[in-house]
Structures are given as structure tokens and as C-alpha cells.
Amino acid sequence: MAKERPENREGLVGDIKEYADIRLDEFKLKATKSLSSVLSQTLSILLVIALLVTLLGLLSVALLQWLNNVFGNPFGTLIVAGVIAVILIVLFILRKRLFHNMFVKMFIDAFYNDDNDEQQV
């Protein structure tokens, strides 16, 4: 029986190494899935934001031209600049609620949502 113990230890060490490798591979797969999900969501949000900024710019130019025709050249520009400044101030005040909480929730859902992982396996 004394000879079986060293062999059992070697087999146990091999099993532990194999288990650790499997767990590491599982972690890598979950991390890759989570990171790709977060990246795709972030890129889609950035695309929507870019399109909204472009739309806001075009609407600002149209409003600027219309207000310049109605009130005269410098006043229309000042009105549009004031409206954009108010929008920026509101966004700055609400930045944590609008952006920080949204991204934190997105990361938490992506990295700690194990319900979907268990159902797919």
C-alpha cells in the first residue's frame, strides 16, 4: 500500500492541473463573451450618440438660419448658442444618472449575469 500512495499523489496532482486548466479555459471563455458583449453595446451606444450629435448639429444650423432671418444676424446665433449651452449644462448635471449608472449596469449585467450561462449549457 505504501507504493500506491506516491502513484495516487501523482495522479491527484495531474487531476488538479487538468481541473485548473479547465477552470482557466472556462474563465477565459466567459471573460471573452462578457467583454465582447460590453464592447458591442458600448459601440452601439456611441454610434447612436454620434448620430444624435450630428442631428443636433444639423437642427442647430437650420434653427440658426431661421432665427437669423427672423431676429437679425447676431441674435439668432446667440439664441442657438444659449439653447446648446442649456442642453450641455443639463447633461453635465445629469451625467452620473444618465451615463455612469447606465455603463455600470451594463458591465454588471455582462460580467455577473450567470443565469443565461447556466441555461445555455
Image (cartoon, helix red, strand yellow):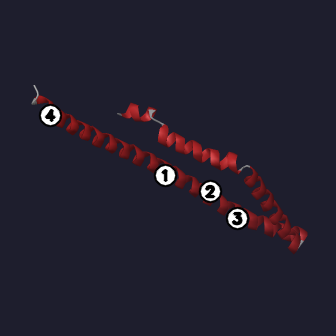
For badge 1, the amino acid type reads Ser
Left or right: 4 with respect to 107? left
Report helix, strand or loop for mark 1: helix
Q: Which residue is mark 3?
A: 57
Q: Nearer the viewer, mark 4 or mark 2?
A: 4
Quarter of the image with the N terminus in it = top left
User: Mark 1 to mark 4: distance in Å?
Assistant: 51 Å
For this orientation, the residue located farthest to the front is: 2
- Marker disc for residue 49: 2
Residue positioned 65% across, 57% down in the render = 52
Q: Point out the tag, 1 or 3, that comes first from the N-terminus.
A: 1
Q: Point out the tag, 1 or 2, that comes first from the N-terminus.
A: 1
User: Mark 3 to mark 2: distance in Å?
Assistant: 12 Å
For this orientation, the residue located farthest to the bottom is: 73
Q: Point out the tag, 3 or 2, that comes first from the N-terminus.
A: 2
The percent coordinates of residue 36 (x first, y second) are 44, 50
